[in-house]
Image: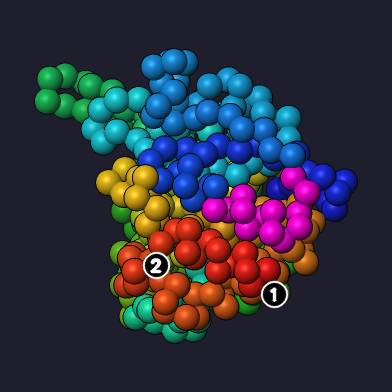
Amino acid sequence: MSTAPSGPETHQVALIPGDGIGPEVTGAALQVLEAAGVSIRWEEVEAGAEVVQKHGSPVPDRALTAIRGSGVALKGPIGTPIGEGFRSANVTLRQSLDLYASVRPVKNIPGVPCRYQDVDLVVVRENTEGLYSGLEHRVAPGIVESLKIVTERASLRIAACAFELAEREGRPEVCTVHKANIMKLSDGLFLECARRVAREHPDIVHREIIIDNCAMQLVRDPSRFSVLLLENLYGDILSDLCAGLVGGLGVVPGANLGDDCAVFEAVHGSAPDIAGKRVANPTALILSSVMMLRHLGESAAADAIENAVHSVLADEKNHTADIGGTATLDGVTAAITERL
């Protein structure tokens, strides 16, 4: 995994505003970063549904070049058509840049209403293969085949990512989530690779759990989990479930990490139904920018922004509609920048 050192005072970062509410929440994040005093030179590039007609792809080559050049990007949400249309821009980014690890911390924010307390876990999801890759074709009229490809190489490196994260953050265990009782070869390979990596980290407890049982245990007592290691599709589903445990997708950050590049993004969708209304919750992307700052070695600024976000959300007058309030995007953003 790449770990960016403390670099020059001015950081070069690619910016992808995204679709729908994307430009609104990325604008909020930029205001907060500026208020924190971080010097960033942004290179804005297009990606998403609106650029397909111009470039024939939701992720033009210029966007990939910009991210490779800086090694870091902040990305707003991008919409993907359901059941038709262009290939997912998120899948394209992850596979083109080999962003093999999706890392999503899930933790309670004081004041944000939710059903559970004491939730503090990290979802580590393999990001490049499996059923989520969308390798499908029509066999015959009315028959479609979807390929689930699992490799030893990808399984070993994502397991190493999870165990190294647990060691780095002082987390006691990694729990590998699988369905190897049914998919004995594909999930069996993933599980065996996790076991091999676990033997190299004897101080970290390794647990194994079947995915359906994991889903049930998460809604019974999520505090029993610390690091969840999952393949691609399972991670996509359970990471959203985990977000729901602490208030929803509007308050949970995310990162897609590789050896050479890192893309930080909110995990929610583009919400076209509220685009332009200035009522979206900017918290998820602001906290994603906190993850980006830590990646860049800007720990003090990251801590300051995170503390400001927590302080603001502790007051229910700063809650947007998704977490039961009436605050606006601009109101929340202003409150955070004032705290800074």
Q: In the rendering, which numbered label is found on residue 89?
A: none
Q: Principal SS element in the magenta part? A: helix
Asked if residue 290 lies left or right of residue 232, the reply is: right
Query: Across the whole image, how many numbered discs are drawn on residues?
Result: 2
Contact (Cβ within 8 Å) of mark 2 with mark 1:
no
Image point (37%, 78%), residue name: 114
Residue shown at the point (76%, 57%) measured from the top left = 37
Dot 2 or dot 1, earlier in sequence: 1
Residue lying farthest right?
Answer: 8
Report the colour scheme.
rainbow
x, y percentage for residue 298?
78, 58
Relative to 183, does residue 228 appear above or below in the rendering?
Answer: below
Q: Residue beneath label 1, please?
A: 170
Which picture quadrant has residue 84?
top left
Q: Amino acid at mark 1?
A: Gly
Where is residue 287 shown, x and y percent of the image? Answer: 57, 61
Q: Is residue 168 left or right of residue 338?
A: right
Q: Is residue 155 visible?
A: no
Q: In the orientation shown, which residue stands out farthest toward the left? A: 142
Answer whether residue 312 is visible to the viewer in this image: yes
Q: Secondary structure at mark 1?
A: loop
Q: Which residue is mark 2?
A: 327
Taking the magenta stretch, the answer to whether it contains residue 87 is no
Q: Amino acid at mark 2?
A: Ala
| Label 2 element class | loop
Q: In the image, which residues are magenta?
A: 28-40
